[in-house]
């Protein structure tokens, strides 16, 4: 069984988990396929299901619940250390996907300019299996 976990870079500033330096402060994120089709052909079809819009109070509670406090504290103590969540991924036709819903990429980049819902976010690192 794999224990690989990519470093997560994220540019989705509208998410409550987003932190300076394009880091994600969530304890765990889940990457999903396009909800309508259940598959992904391009990175635009993928999304970060753990996205929580900053403006919604209900979502703030969810975000606090999923906060990676250990990671935040560690980063504060060791200046410059990368904070990164555990990643589970359901995009089984990505070449980085591994059985058990792991991602074996060295790092992933989550994007979504002006995102207001999970569908607006993408795993930019997605590459279809050949
Ligand atoms: S969109 Fe996903 S990867 Fe980006 S900060 Fe939010 S939870 Fe983390
Ligand atoms: S790179 Fe592929 S396997 Fe890794 S999180 Fe993104 S879509 Fe999932």
Image (cartoon, rainbow, N blue to C red):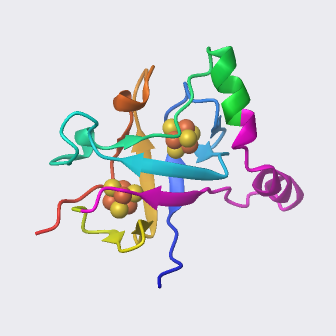
Answer with the quarter of the image where residue 13 lies: top right
Rendered location of residue 36, percent (x, y): 22, 33
Residue closest to the far bottom: 1
Query: Does 72 appear in magenta?
Result: yes
Identify whether 106 is placed above or below 34: below
What residue is shown at x 68% (from left), y 34% (from top)?
Answer: 63
Give the residue at x 69% y 43%. Answer: 66
Q: Quadrant of ligand 1?
A: top right
Image quadrant in which the C terminus is located? bottom left
Residue farthest toward the left in the current orientation of the protein: 130
Name the residue at the right extreme.
Answer: 77
Q: What is the magenta range?
A: 64-92
Residue for point 73% across, 27% down: 61
Q: Position of residue 5 (x, y in %)?
A: 52, 69
- Taking the image as shown, residue 97 lies to the left or right of residue 79, namely left
**15 relative to 72 in the view: left or right:** left
Q: Is residue 100 left or right of residue 96?
A: right
100, 112: nearer the viewer: 100
- Residue 46 belongs to magenta span: no
Q: Position of residue 41 (x, y in %)?
A: 15, 48
Q: Does any portion of residue 22 appear in the rendered image?
A: no
| Residue 85, x across and y down, in percent | 61, 56
């Amino acid at each position: 069984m794999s224990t690989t976990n990519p470093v997560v870079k994220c540019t989705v500033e509208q998410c409550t988990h987003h932190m300076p330096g394009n880091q994600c402060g969530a304890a765990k994120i889940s990457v999903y396929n396009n909800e309508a089709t259940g598959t992904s052909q391009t990175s635009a079809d993928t999304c970060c299901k753990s996205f929580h819009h900053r403006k919604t109070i209900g979502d703030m509670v969810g975000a606090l619940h999923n906060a990676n406090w250990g990671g935040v504290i560690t980063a504060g103590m060791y200046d410059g250390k990368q904070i990164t969540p555990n990643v589970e991924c359901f995009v089984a036709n990505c070449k980085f996907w591994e059985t058990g819903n792991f991602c074996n990429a060295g790092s992933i980049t989550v994007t979504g300019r002006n995102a207001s819902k999970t569908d607006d976010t993408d795993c930019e690192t997605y590459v279809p299996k050949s």
